[in-house]
Image: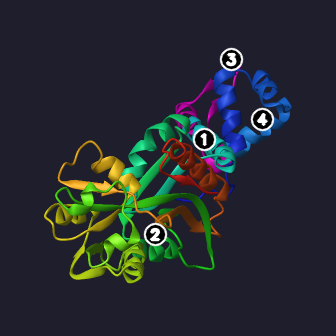
Amino acid sequence: MPIPKIPLTLRQLRYLVAIEETGHFRLAAESCGISQPSLSVQIKALEEALSLTLIERGRGPVKLTLAGREVVARARDILDATQAIVDLSATLQTGLAGTLRLGTSTTLGPYLMPHIVGDLHRSHPDLRLYVREAAPHDLARQISEGGHDLILTQLPIPGASLVTERLFREPLVVAISADHPLAQRSQIEPQDLSGETILSLSPNYALHDQISALCVETGATLSREYEGTSLDALRQMVAMGMGTTFLPALYVRSEILGRAQDVAVRPFKGKRFSRSIGLVWRSTSGASTAHRQLADVIRSYARQLPELIIEG
């Protein structure tokens, strides 16, 4: 297909649509805010660019040729799409819109995001949020490589080119089998863990390092025979009396409280044992305004949960 020697413009397409709508050159020119001779020149230039006759010249109301009607039909779609881009640009500059690719930890996203997406869709209907789960170490690599627009995960995430927005601190509670002697306590003291076998997730999860350090501090033994691949797996091992573990508060709220009878959860006394949760994105993304609005939405939900400590 030959490329037109004279490029057509959106302005010319807009003028042609105006002629079709008004049926008159003068009225079309007035609606477009230009003179009638200028409009005529632009329509002639459009016909030359397309090598088509778009308008029947003669007396009476202006009539479009067959080619003119076909071009107008497509011009409307182009102009509507162009306006949509302009509208989207304005929305993206001031709020959440478009498509966001959110990576999240498997120990966090499933127990937090389901409570947020409904309100998020109602308050930001132009936003499409694609959520993918991965281990924190994988998330750190993927955000740097551009695999996600932002990630929701346990902090810290290293990277000089990354922006971190802290959201809240999430307590970790002790999980023990329902028939364990410690289940009779209202809270667990550090010395209570001395000699206990502690189950943990694999080193791919930030929780592993926290739990490992606590074992050294309390005299507990970190199990090397079994490293869980999910919080559900840890809970099942605890229920069978294979050891004790620490579970995040959001998981406990979602999967244990009022449901599980084979596992008891107790707060850990002494220093508050918790993990810091935040949103992370590349400093070069150009979307910090939208990302911080998403952070505000998440904090708004987190404020409703008394066990969480709001940050930021």
**Going by the image, does 141 lie left or right of 28?**
left
Q: Who is closer to the viewer here, 155 or 308? A: 308
User: Element under label 3?
Assistant: loop
Q: Quadrant of the C terminus?
A: bottom right
Q: Mark 3 — residue?
A: 61
Earlier along the polypeptide chain: callout 1 or callout 2?
Answer: 1
Q: Mark 2 — residue?
A: 147
Mark 3: give few (<14), some (14-19) or many (20+) Cα within 10 Å. Answer: few
Earlier along the polypeptide chain: callout 1 or callout 3?
Answer: 3
User: Element under label 1?
Assistant: helix
**Going by the image, does 235 lie left or right of 124?**
left
Residue 283, horizontal then vertical, whole percent? 65, 69
User: Element under label 4?
Assistant: helix
Image quarter of residue 267: bottom left
| Amino acid type, mark 1 | Ala
Q: Which mark is residue 40?
A: 4
Q: Who is closer to the viewer here, 152 or 86? A: 152
Mark 1 or mark 2, whichever is nearer to me: 2
Q: Residue at x 79, y 28 (%)?
A: 29
Q: Is residue 48 magenta?
A: yes
Earlier along the polypeptide chain: callout 3 or callout 2?
Answer: 3
Q: Are marks 4 and 2 in contact (CB under 8 Å)?
A: no
Say if 179 sits above or below 229 in the image.
Answer: above
Image quarter of residue 115: top left
Earlier along the polypeptide chain: callout 4 or callout 1?
Answer: 4
Q: Is residue 197 magenta?
A: no
| Amino acid type, mark 2 | Gly
Earlier along the polypeptide chain: callout 4 or callout 2?
Answer: 4
**Going by the image, does 301 lie left or right of 246?**
right
Q: The magenta stretch spans which residues?
A: 47-75
For the residues marked 1 and 2, what is the alpha-carbon distance in whole angstroms? 26 Å
| Amino acid type, mark 4 | Ser
